[in-house]
Image (cartoon, rainbow, N blue to C red):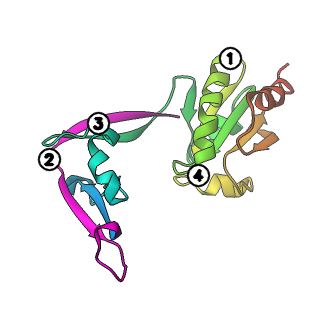
């Protein structure tokens, strides 16, 4: 699963300063934020100290008065890596002919994002030899529970519906390749 970004322009930001909980109300205890009402209160820190207040423009060169660009990540899949969930698990993984690699992941997981490009590369490398699937553990919790997935990313290899190998964590491509090669005939 790769991330695609959709960007839109929003009306002007309102600049607001917030006071840290401190005994003095000096300028050094203030932080300047850009706040977009449409983003549900998402704040972008513009500066931390009074000396950096003059350097706002160089630090955020694309922040212009009147227009703000907001980008949002969206889930996408490649043609070679498909989505599997609790309801499609049996038909896509357990009843598949040949080796199947399943990447158990979640959108909030940093190591899952690190290993995602490797899984996509391997899907291209093993096209026609291994089927590749991704299972979002937040959306489909019963399958990971059934296979005792306790941390993510976890990559499992199935052959003829039977779990043959599990790789836990963000590992190098060579580790994944050697695991896959063990089950190719």
Q: Earlier in the sequence, mark 1 or mark 2?
A: 2
Residue sitting at 68 percent across and 23 percent down? 122
Cα–Cα span, label 3 and label 2: 16 Å
Q: Residues within 10 Å of mark 4 (few under 14, many from 20)?
A: many
Q: Is residue 2 left or right of residue 170?
A: left
Point out residue 81 in the picture as x, y percentages from the top left corner: 57, 29
Q: Nearer the viewer, residue 123 or 159?
A: 123
27 to 166, vertically: above or below: below
Can see residue 96?
yes
Circle 4 is placed at which residue position? Answer: 137
Please name the residue that numbered disc 2 is placed on: 12
Task: Name the residue nearer the viewer: 145 or 150.
Answer: 150
Q: How far apart, in angstroms, are the residues tagged by discs 1 and 2? A: 47 Å
Labels 3, 2: front one:
3
Question: Residue 17 lies in magenta, yes or no?
Answer: yes
- Quadrant housing residue 104: top right
Task: From the image, tell me which residue sits under label 3.
Answer: 61
Mark 3: secondary structure: loop
Residue numbers of the magenta segment: 1-28
Labels 1 and 3 touching (C-beta < 8 A): no
Q: In terms of image quadrants, where is residue 74?
A: top left
């Amino acid at each position: 699963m790769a991330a695609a970004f959709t960007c839109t322009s929003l009306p002007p930001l309102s600049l607001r300063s917030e006071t840290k909980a401190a005994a003095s109300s000096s300028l050094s205890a203030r932080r300047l934020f850009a706040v977009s009402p449409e983003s549900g209160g998402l704040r972008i820190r513009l500066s931390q100290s009074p000396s950096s207040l003059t350097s706002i423009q160089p630090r955020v060169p694309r922040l212009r008065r009147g227009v703000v660009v907001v980008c949002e990540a969206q889930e996408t899949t490649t043609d070679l890596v498909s989505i599997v969930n609790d309801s499609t698990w049996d038909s896509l993984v357990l009843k598949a002919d040949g080796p199947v690699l399943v990447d158990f992941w979640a959108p909030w997981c940093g190591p899952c994002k690190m290993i995602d490009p490797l899984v996509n590369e391997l899907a291209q490398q093993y096209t026609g030899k291994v089927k590749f699937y991704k299972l979002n553990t937040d959306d489909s919790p019963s399958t990971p529970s059934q296979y005792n997935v306790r941390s993510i990313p976890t990559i499992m290899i199935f052959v003829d519906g039977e779990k043959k190998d599990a790789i836990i964590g963000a590992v190098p491509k060579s580790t994944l390749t050697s695991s896959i090669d063990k089950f190719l005939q």
